[in-house]
Image (cartoon, grey):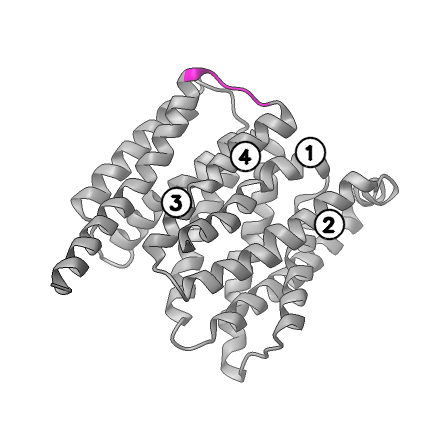
């Protein structure tokens, strides 16, 4: 049951790209990031008021800069420059970068299963993203790689804070602090290109409102709240299975909202990437199940 619940936030995260391109086209990514982060953080603060301790502000500010300010900005750059399906599927490459980070920085070598799955994922991604297979915006691809690194580094920092700072405080204040950073950056950006922001304000309509409600309420406040709530009740491995809804949502929403279509070969490569990204977790779950069953005998 928890795995099915884990699919809910993963699904909403996967819709980010298509919903943004469909309802909020040409909005500045910095502004979108600020509108996504700060209101959601304030909503969570109202739900459960918390205040960081004196020695916690600096690390939460760093986390907000990486996990929220930089990551959210990059996500909306991807949403405006890459096909929704490619953005969703591309982000399943996170395990490969996390594996390399743990190996090179933390000196934790991957298992054979992780290494082989990572190699297969890289090969599939190389074929899918090659210029001969599909034409992609290089800015969007660069944003995707940077966003993946934000996830890896930000998750590593978050994990080290788990025993020192309450998870709700981490969740709420990284959104608030990251949102403040993005708001200040957006104000500077508006002073440099005021015509872009004037166009956003004067052209605001019901579709834009729907997009903001979706991105702020469902995509961020609800999804991040469910994410941290579920992690208290299930393992990270189990939660990962719910992540399959992310790229699937990106593919389906891209087809429905934007009319995106790909060749059969490209859909096959996307499916292969999704399955390959889940393979190490599936094997680990099977091993844990066997160990638990033997221990209960």
Q: Name the residue under label 2.
A: 189
Q: How crowded is mark 2: few (under 14 residues within 10 Å), some or many (20 or more)?
A: some
Count of all numbered marks drawn on residues in the image: 4
Q: Is the magenta stretch mostly helix, strand or loop?
A: loop
Label 3 vs 1, first from the N-terminus: 1
In three-dimensional space, the C-alpha distance between marks 3 and 1, rounded to whole angstroms, equals 26 Å
Task: Name the side, left or right, on which 259 lies relative to 206.
Answer: left
Is the C terminus in the top left, top right, bottom left or bottom right quadrant?
bottom left
Q: Nearer the viewer, residue 67 or 58?
A: 67
Of badges 2 and 1, nearer the viewer stands 1
Label 2 vs 3, first from the N-terminus: 3
Q: Name the residue under label 4.
A: 140
- Please provide percent x and percent y for residue 244: 42, 41
In three-dimensional space, the C-alpha distance between marks 2 and 4, rounded to whole angstroms, equals 20 Å
Residue lying furthest bottom in this view? 54
Label 2 vs 1, first from the N-terminus: 1
- Please provide percent x and percent y for residue 85: 51, 31
SS at badge 4: helix
């Amino acid at each position: 049951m928890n795995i099915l619940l884990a699919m809910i936030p993963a699904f909403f995260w996967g819709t980010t790209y298509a919903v943004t391109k469909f309802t909020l086209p040409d909005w500045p990514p910095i502004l979108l990031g600020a509108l996504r982060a700060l209101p959601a953080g304030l909503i969570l603060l109202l739900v459960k008021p918390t205040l960081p301790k004196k020695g916690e502000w600096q690390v939460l500010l760093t986390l907000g800069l990486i996990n929220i300010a930089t990551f959210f900005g990059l996500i909306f750059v991807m949403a405006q420059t890459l096909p929704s399906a490619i953005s969703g599927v591309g982000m399943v490459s996170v395990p490969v970068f996390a594996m390399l980070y743990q190996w090179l920085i933390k000196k934790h070598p991957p298992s054979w299963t992780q290494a082989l799955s990572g190699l297969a994922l890289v090969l599939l991604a190389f074929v899918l993203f090659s210029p001969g297979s599909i034409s992609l915006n290089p800015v969007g691809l660069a944003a995707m790689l940077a966003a993946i690194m934000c996830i890896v580094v930000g998750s590593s920092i978050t994990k080290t804070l788990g025993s020192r700072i309450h998870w709700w405080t981490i969740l709420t204040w990284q959104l608030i602090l990251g949102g403040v950073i993005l708001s200040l950056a957006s104000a500077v950006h508006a002073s440099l290109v005021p015509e872009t922001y004037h166009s956003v304000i004067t052209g605001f309509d019901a579709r834009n409102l729907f997009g903001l409600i979706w991105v702020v309420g469902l995509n961020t406040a609800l999804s991040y709240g469910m994410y941290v709530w579920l992690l208290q009740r299930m393992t990270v491995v189990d939660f990962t299975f719910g992540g399959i809804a992310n790229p699937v949502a990106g593919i389906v929403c891209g087809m429905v909202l934007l009319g995106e279509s790909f060749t059969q070969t490209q859909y096959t490569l996307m499916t292969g990437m999704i399955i390959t990204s889940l393979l190490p977790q599936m094997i680990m779950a099977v091993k844990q199940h066997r160990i638990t069953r033997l221990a209960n005998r």
